[in-house]
Amino acid sequence: MKIGQLADKTGLSIQTIRFYERKALLAAPQRTQSNYRSYSDEALKQLLFIKQCRSLDMTIEEISLVLETRAKPDNSCETVNATIDKHIDDIEQRITELNALRRSLVSVRSTCADNKKVKECGVLHQLESIAETRTTPKNII
Amino acid sequence: MKIGQLADKTGLSIQTIRFYERKALLAAPQRTQSNYRSYSDEALKQLLFIKQCRSLDMTIEEISLVLETRAKPDNSCETVNATIDKHIDDIEQRITELNALRRSLVSVRSTCADNKKVKECGVLHQLESIAETRTTPKNII
DNA sequence: GTAAACTCTATACTTGGTATAGAGTCAAGC
DNA sequence: GCTTGACTCTATACCAAGTATAGAGTTTAC
Ligand SMILES: [Zn+2]
Ligand SMILES: [Zn+2]
Ligand SMILES: [Zn+2]
Ligand SMILES: [Zn+2]
């Protein structure tokens, strides 16, 4: 199977497939005589797995870890579960941050009604004067 | 004021200040004879304003828009309010996406208890078989 | 035989910075 | 006067997870 067919079957772009290869998520496939990539059905399965992980917003690094564990069928799946648990935690943390952010924004926004002039705008005044009450989130998911 | 002092006063790094200058959030300051940047108190105020906006997770583009409006005191503040409103909307949308993501992840995670082997791991089986039920969020905040 | 469709590599771009290298500048101490 | 350390300058590369070209080579259809 050439890369274009694989892209069609997975719904990933050709560039993305090559990108995953560079990132070592996908093994470098065999090449035809004219240097075209030639994929097996295994590669298709692997890509669908990766796509699934990405749709859950797992990072390349997280996916690498899971793939590594998956490659050894008799190993414990501990790492996999730990990765997912941590990822859930990542996301819950980000939700918490975004909720705090939303509250701050709504509060700032509430200080201006419509049709004011810039010099009377409560929002702008707020943005000029708020002290360091919040810290910016460090881990952006 | 030289850039190091400005960095100390704002809590931003020197590189970040130069970065904002490149992005035209901060006007290019005067230079000393030895080509050092020399800042006014205006620049300090501007940077604190920008920092405030960033702490609300506004993008550089959004901040540009607000700064542009702010520069004309007799203008209507409509643009500012619209920017904030849209930004709140951005964040609410992202929260919604992350909540959906969290539910998916928790559901996947629930299919595996501890201490299984890789070949019996429910999580891995899920990741292999889930169809395209969800779509990946497009706008990552 | 030629044109369209495909593939290859390499490179640049995105966001909001961070982290160097290598060169120049300034102030203090000796 | 000279060195040392702290500071600044520009330019460049790097991070994530791709996307989007350019320019060259290949295959397929007619
Ligand atoms: Zn994660
Ligand atoms: Zn207003
Ligand atoms: Zn926004
Ligand atoms: Zn498991």
Image (cartoon, coloured by chain):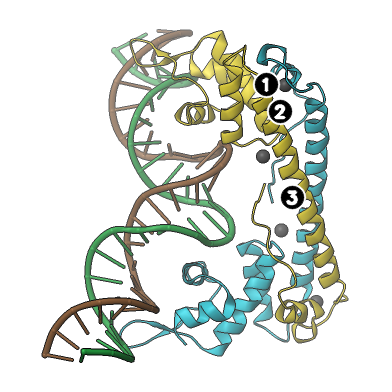
Chain colours: A yellow, B cyan, C green, D brown
Disc number lying in front (3 or 2): 2
Chain hosting mark 2? A
Quick check: can you spot residue B138?
A: yes
**Given the image, on which type of amino acid does mark 1 rest?**
Cys
Per the model, the C-alpha gap separating discs 1 and 2 is 6 Å
**Given the image, on which type of amino acid does mark 3 rest?**
Arg
Neighbour class for label 3 at 10 Å: few (<14), some, many (≥20)?
Answer: many
Taking the image as four quarters, which one is ligand 3 found in? Answer: bottom right
Establish if A122 lies above or below D22.
Answer: below
B25 relative position to B73: left or right: left
The residue tagged with tag 3: helix, strand or loop? helix
Name the residue rendered at 36%, 87% in the picture: B32
Q: Quadrant of residue B43?
A: bottom right
Establish if B125 lies above or below B32.
Answer: above
> Same chain for marks 1 and 2?
yes
Neighbour class for label 1 at 10 Å: few (<14), some, many (≥20)?
Answer: many
**Given the image, on which type of amino acid does mark 2 rest?**
Asn
Q: Which residue is mark 2?
A: A81
Label 3 within 8 A of ligand 1 by Cβ: no
Chain hosting mark 3? A
> Same chain for marks 3 and 2?
yes
Label 2 within 8 A of ligand 4 by Cβ: yes
> Same chain for marks 3 and 1?
yes
A22 relative position to A59: left or right: left
Q: Which residue is mark 3?
A: A94
Q: Which residue is mark 1?
A: A77
**Callouts 1 and 2 close, C-beta under 8 Å:** yes
Q: Nearer the viewer, residue C11 or A41?
A: A41
Lower position in the chain sequence, tag 3 or tag 1 = 1
The residue tagged with tag 2: helix, strand or loop? helix
**Callouts 3 and 2 close, C-beta under 8 Å:** no
Name the residue rendered at 81%, 60% in the picture: A100
